[in-house]
Image: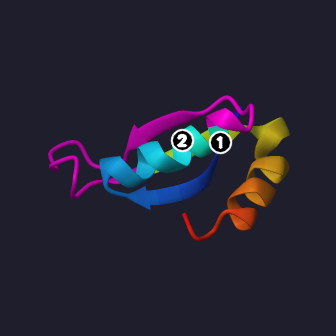
Amino acid sequence: MWVVVYMAQGKEMSEKIGDLLTKEGFLIKIKPIYKNVAPENNYYKIMVPKSEASEAHKVLMENKYL
């Protein structure tokens, strides 16, 4: 099961967070919230497997000033 660990505004920010988590060894999925919104204005769910959620949160908190 996948769980949301972060909600990012804009495609660029979601990719930046996704890259950070991937470099740390996490499997990720990034999905847009809205269908008919431009990528730069949309919000994105960043998801990891449930078993990795706690560790992913720690990594995000350590890097909160991306």
Q: Amino acid at mark 1?
A: Leu
**Which residue is identified by label 2?**
18
Decide if residue 43 is on the left or right side of residue 4: left
* Residue occupying image coordinates x 54% and y 33%: 29
- Within 10 Å of disc 2 (Cα), the crowding (few <14, some 14-19, many 20+) is many
* Residue nearer the viewer, 60 or 34: 60
> Is there CB contact under 8 Å for labels 2 and 1?
yes
* Residue occupying image coordinates x 67% and y 29%: 27
**Which residue is identified by label 1?**
21
For residue 62, above or below residue 45: below
Highlighted range, magenta: 22-44
* Residue occupying image coordinates x 15% and y 49%: 38
Give yes or no for residue 36 being in the magenta stretch. yes
Give yes or no for residue 25 being in the magenta stretch. yes
- Within 10 Å of disc 1 (Cα), the crowding (few <14, some 14-19, many 20+) is some
Decide if residue 53 is on the left or right side of residue 22: right
Decide if residue 22 is on the left or right side of residue 25: left
Q: CA distance from mark 2 to mark 1?
A: 5 Å
Q: Position of residue 46 (x, y in %)?
A: 54, 46
Q: Amino acid at mark 2?
A: Gly
